[in-house]
Image (tube, rainbow, N blue to C red):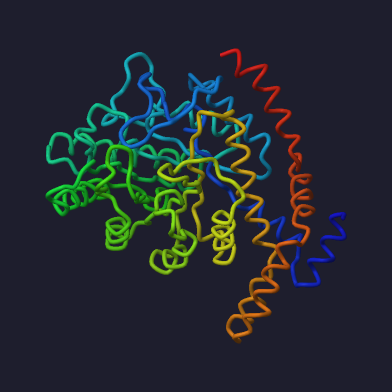
Amino acid sequence: MSYREASKKYAKIGIDTEKAIRDLGKIAISLHCWQGDDVGGFESTGGASGGIATTGNYPGKARTPQELMSDLEFALSLIPGSHRVNLHACYGIHEGKVTDRDKLSPANFAPWVKWAKKAGVKLDFNPTFFSHGNVKDGLTLSSPDPKIRKFWIDHGIACIKIAEYFAKELKSPCAINFWMPDGYKDEPSDRLGPRQRMADSLDKIFKCKYDKKAVVPTLESKLFGIGVESYTVGSHEFVMGYAATRKILALLDMGHFHLSESVADKISAFLMTFGKVAFHISRPVRWDSDHVIRQNDDLRAAAQEIVKMGPQNFIVALDYFDASINRVAAWVLGMRNMQKELLKAMLVPWKSLTKLQESGDFTTQLVLQEEYKNYPAEEVWAEFCRRSGRVADESWFDAVRKYEKDVLLKR
């Protein structure tokens, strides 16, 4: 079937495929830098620690800022549309002696801004509350040691200033996401105290002066992390309560809940509470929260909620890392999978289906929900890619294989 024929078929159910193509092109997803080097960063050679870990040893990971920038640029060249790049604080660039995290400044990220301008992307940011000697007994902002808390408070404030720098230099608001791995491996005697200390620390961070139109703080919860299986300070309930009372955004991560929960079902409640939804796209498998995303039911349901409630009301970023496969392929596949599911959701007549729901005609609703799944979305995807100057099928992987041979395997 041609795109023209597919467009006519969709028109019969009230879908304008031209509008869907335009709307998909407006959605800028933030591509996470840490897939490119296994969450290593440029401070040391110690690797990720403190509640997270990567597995695998596929050859070719980025070792320097220049290599990571090149890999990101190549990945973006295979992805249709215009997107963003998400940086962690541990990816600061240091001349000589490494600047510790409580002293980071825009100067450590000026090369990233220069690269972003050249690559035509905007930047988002994250403080790095892991993989550091000041993660004491699994705690950072909730530590009972005031010196440890002070170090991480200063880090958070420094990162807000860097996010403000990104926003002003690149003329685009910068989302800055706070995730702390704080918790305990075994049952704690006091669950309240660490949460009170974390709330107080966050209050001190967010009381610093910054342009609230330029910087968009978000706070992310998690069910548990490695080594903190029994108690997570920044639980879902803590984050929801803190964010709602301090008027910042709580962030949903698809991998940070029990596997029996539907993260898509939470989205509408978040939108009602916060007016905007910050969302990390990931894929949980048993205990691991960060597999490369696939076109599965969970991703489809999440994309449908984003489309139904308006993509302009969402801050969407990818968040996974896999060291067992080609890292560039992981970026490209994940981003294209997200875009495909968003497009499929745009090609469903949700208003007419909602009318069936509200009238109680659940039989017709069920029948049409299933039949629409088999409409020719792939033809619309192919047209979107053609107009973006990208291939629509798996032949993009040929370019990755060549890049692996010519660049990655020579590292």
Compare residues 45 and 160 and report the one nearer the observer: 45
Q: Position of residue 71 (x, y in %)?
A: 58, 27
| Residue 109, image x, y percentages | 42, 29
Question: Which residue: 74% across, 68% down?
Answer: 15
Q: 45 or 169, which is in the foreground?
A: 45
Tell me if residue 365 comes above or below residue 132 in the rendering: below
Write the residue at 38% across / 33% down.
89
- Quadrant of the drawing holding the C terminus: top right
Vertical side of 199 occupied by 333: above or below: above
**Residue 363 percent location from the top left of the image:** 65, 80
Q: Residue furthest bottom?
A: 359
Q: How many marks?
A: 0
Pick the residue in front: 349 or 28: 349
Which image quarter: residue 19?
bottom right
Left or right position of 410 against 391: left
Q: Residue at x 19, y 44 (%)?
A: 142
In the shown orientation, is residue 102 left or right of residue 249? left
Query: Left or right of 258: which side holds 319?
Result: right
Q: Residue at x 34, y 57 (%)?
A: 248
Quarter holding the N terminus is bottom right
Q: Position of residue 24 (x, y in %)?
A: 66, 54
In the image shown, does 283 or 2 lie closer to the viewer? 283
